[in-house]
Image (cartoon, rainbow, N blue to C red):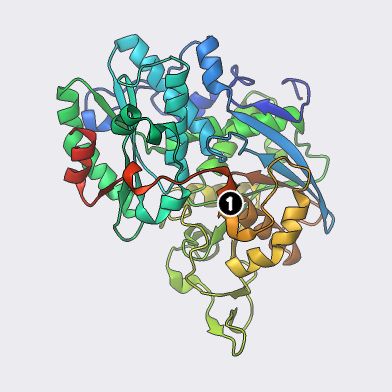
Amino acid sequence: MNTLAPPAMSGNLLTDFTELLPRAIAECVADPAPVTGDPARFSPGFELPPPDAGIQRLYAAATARWWPLGEYAGHRLTLLDLAGNPGTHTTKTFASLLIVARAIGYIRRTGEPITIFSPTSANKGTALRDAVLRAIEAELVTPEQLRVVILAPESSRDKLRAGRMCTDPTLRELNPLLLHRGIPPESVKQLGRQFADTYAPRLKQGGRNLWYSLDLANYLVADTARAFFEHAVDPTDPASAPRWHAHAVSSAFGMLGYHHGRAVLEGAGLATPASRPATLLVQHLATADMVLSLCTGGFEREGLPRYSAEAGTGLHRQDGKTDPHFPATTCDPDEVLDPTFYTRRPATSPAMNELIGRFGGDGIVVSLHECLHRYPEIRARLAGHERELPADVRKLREWSLVMAMTGVLNAVDRGLVTPGADIVVHGSGWYSTDEYRPPGESETTTVDNVDDIAAAVIG
């Protein structure tokens, strides 16, 4: 059944499975051809450049590891470490490298320059900037041929990263980092779409393609390789213990990509639907929409349990019968645990609900109070990893891993996970203040509307 590479505990998601990536594109993309007729909807297509030495250098950061985390209450825990790239420390690396590779291929074929433009809560933008810089430093493109413009909420400043894109005056001007003060933070998506619709035609008239890259298919393809990697190092077996995959999610792009990867494996006869793992979605209270949709059928916050302040402790506890899918205790029923998780009413919920209904799984929401309670135990489980969690939790800036681990431990304790199931935790990101420098005021541009964006991008 397992005909991929011999088992190994580490690998490269973009170079180890080149024979499966075309199948992944066919699985995830309705039409892989470039879109050039409408400048506001431009896409370079999904044709990847030949994997020459330069492209191999670009892909070198796409590493993953299969890291044992011991057992908990009869469950074998494993970390799928997707945060090894030192330029990002998040899973957004993989899709960003493929996005840049596709842009390089288009530029080589046509000679036309591209500006990648993306709204982001932080991590997606950091990864795109890192990938573009890698392409420039590998001399695959010039700074004028490939640019990237990022639009992020002002509240995410401390999660963004300074680097050569900020300190090099030419690169800073060509690749502006834009911060928007609007409320809610997710409004950057609407503002970004308005800018593309309004100004992409003008950029095209000047000879430059604007690629508004915030499209689900752009991320699904790279995330299919999570399933390929799992199959290579520890394939599922319907005759052995069932398996669950846990992921801290905003829109669950990563888990949807994983399931598309499983569909590729099953279509190729390398795996069976009977062995496909169940899914545990983990969210926080500020944007618990996917868990609400799964549990209640809607996004309305009226579906959350009622919480009452507890005299003397400052905590809020659930009223009446406790719902195991939501925090038992929280400091604030509306708390923002991590601003990266900012999507409301995600369009991906119906697809994720259907997958969980078919292959099993559940959802759980965690609070900061619960994460802090679990933090010492989670940090101990990561002992021996070269990127351990910081001893001082106040230094942690990316909570994805801690959220996912807290959700897993709580879900096991509350009987939401199949007894004895193996659990794979997607380590989609973790980093601390010791690992990067946020951009300063002079390294970013504040924007309020599409004309402000145009002034920064077009000049």
Establish if 332 lies above or below 456: below
Residue situated in front as seen by the camera: 402 or 320: 402
In the structure shown, which secondary structural element does the residue marked by tag 1 occupy? helix
Query: Left or right of 198: which side holds 258?
Result: right
Q: Residue at x 31, y 54 (%)?
A: 187
The answer, for residue 101, to whether it is visible in the render is no
Indicate the quadrant where residue 38 lies: top left
The N terminus lies in which quarter of the figure?
Answer: top right
Indicate the quadrant where residue 174 lies: top left
Query: Where residue 417 sits: x, y (%)?
Result: 72, 57
Query: Where residue 100 sits: x, y (%)?
Result: 43, 25
Residue situated in front as seen by the camera: 440 or 226: 440
What amino acid is at disc 1?
Ser
Query: Left or right of 457: which side holds 87?
Result: right
The answer, for residue 42, to whether it is visible in the render is yes
Which residue is labeled 1 in the image?
Answer: 400
Q: Which residue is drawn at 27% across and 43% down?
A: 193
Q: Residue at x 64, y 20 (%)?
A: 16
